[in-house]
Amino acid sequence: MSAAPAGGVPGEGSPRRPLRHAVAVGLLSWRAGPGLVACQLAVTVVAGLLPTGSVWGTKILVDGLTAGDPDQAFQAAGVLALLGLAAGVLPHLTRYLRAELDRRLDRLLQDELYASVTGFQGLSRFENPAFLDRLRMAAEATGGALTPVTSGLFDAARNVITLVSLLASLTVLSPVMAGLVTAAAVPALIARMAMVRRRVGMLAGLSATARRQILYSSLITDVRAAKEVRLFGLGGFLKSRVLGELATLQAGERRLDRRESLTQSLLALLSAAVAGAGLLWVVPAALSGALTLGDVTAFAAAVAGTQAALVGLVETVAGAHHALLLFSYHAEVTSLPDDLPAPHGETAVLPALRHGIELRDVWFRYDDDHPWVLRGVDLTIPHGASVALVGLNGAGKSTLIKLLCRFYDPSRGSIHWDGVDIRDVPPGELRRRMGVLFQDYMCYDLTAAENIAMGEIEALHDRSRIASAARLAGVHDIVRALPRGYDTLLSRIFFGPEDEGDPQAGVVLSGGQWQRLALARALLREGRDLLILDEPSAGLDARAEHEIHTRLVELRAGRTSLLVSHRLGTVRAADLIVVVQDGEVVERGTHDDLMAAGGGYAELFDLQARDYLAEAET
């Protein structure tokens, strides 16, 4: 199994390339809205020249007033009025353009991320904590989170235009001051970049802590956990865990905030010192007549405007750097290849199952550091036969199902479908030939019909097929009795104050009812080559279990099927029973054969039978 690299800011397998990522974000923005980008560019140029225009307009106005030239003064006042009008309108236009670009970019980013994640055919990455941390960070790279890059590029361009024009004006008045103001911005930029890296590194390093804090918070408010939390008095314990993880997160933030506060204060002192030095130079120059009153006004405005533009540029670059570090997780996740290796040669055609499925010396473990789960399993599932897999917890039964579905590939050995190695077949094609009920099936917060249709989404609007699958699973009458029948929402998660007292707002099913519904989801795939049922009656009472067992015996007759169950009474009718222990096949045969052999299967069957008889007598 391929594991995502562990660690922090992003993985060693994905080097930090801010320039490449900036270009990638720029191209994504253009794809999201080329017209919006062009409009923002035009607005940026105009907004960038406004401060310099105001500086020179003010100088001309002051000099005109000082010289008593009304024409010059009125012309300058008119120009300043137009500049003020533009300064009032442009921010609102910019805000709208940014918000719309953020919305479109957010949709594009989520489309790209979810397409990549759903494109992973296996399960290895989703059972890897390091990858889950990266995925959580990648999900943070939304359109809004990337605003410092998208709109920040325009902010940076505006600040550069402002800065260049003001520095040119300042150079005309004092080349020395222009150099000092520029030099003072360099340490500010370096310090801000370092602070951003530390903050993103802290977020990545505390990712596991954040996930635990979210977990403990959800347990306190989760309706499924509410019974045990109250029965066992777990509220105080979980609250202490929530507050403990929160304290760890806040301690990291507090350390960073202190360092940033000190750094920002020192940088502010540096800027104030530079501005003060400028004033100490300009006052004597004005008193000696070397500078006019308009020059003094322009100088003061140019220094202030240049420092503001430099601060804005530094903050924009720092913010963009932070956003690009987040985007690097998105780029890393979306660039990952499929976690299942592609066939070495040409893709094989998966034939209709006519002979059977064969596991040849299959070994498997989830990681090189973990113990073997399967050890040299040899097993044949003949075509048209019902095979039952039994064994204690941890024997490897569910892992074997994962391999059959090709969520993982064997560490050693191979699995063949009518002689074709399933690694040479696209996983989607293999899975389309199966109907599967997992032990840990999903309970979707959707309607009853949608829950069943999740088994084959093409049947979503085919109510007759959905109802037929529900009948096979013995859940049709239950669903039909719901407030809105098959259109009843099977959740209260969307329940609001307006739904109080409305039984049609949502219904919560029992565990056994959900089990039947999940079975209907698997049975919706009628006519498939292989039916896999992992503990199909685990959540049912005795009568419901007998009913479902009878239906499944009829349904599996003549079909290739694999049944996993701890209840040995439900597997005795199977054509072949396979006993797995510690990852190895230790017994196989019919129920009568295994009982006659007097091995582990017979012992477990007698033990369960005695329990049932004792319960019946009681």
Image (cartoon, rainbow, N blue to C red):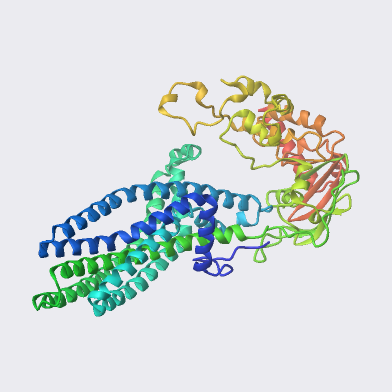
Which residue shows up at 73% across the image and 33% down it?
Answer: 524
For the N terminus, the image quarter is: bottom right
- Can you say whether 294 is above or below 381 in the image? below
Which residue shows up at 65% across the image and 34% down it?
Answer: 515
Coordinates of residue 29 in the picture (x, y in percent) = 51, 54
Of all residues shown, which one is farthest toward the bottom?
A: 176
- Of residues 379 and 390, the one drawn nearer to the viewer in this rendering: 379
98 on left or right of 464: left
- Of residues 24 and 450, the one drawn nearer to the viewer in this rendering: 24
Q: Quadrant of residue 421?
A: bottom right
Coordinates of residue 88 in the picture (x, y in percent) = 28, 49
- Of residues 180 and 431, the one drawn nearer to the viewer in this rendering: 180
- Can you say whether 163 is above or below 90 in the image? below
Which residue shows up at 75% across the image and 62% down it?
Answer: 411
75 on left or right of 379: left
- Can you say whether 244 is above or below 475 in the image? below
- Of residues 94 and 99, the one drawn nearer to the viewer in this rendering: 94
Coordinates of residue 70 in the picture (x, y in percent) = 13, 57
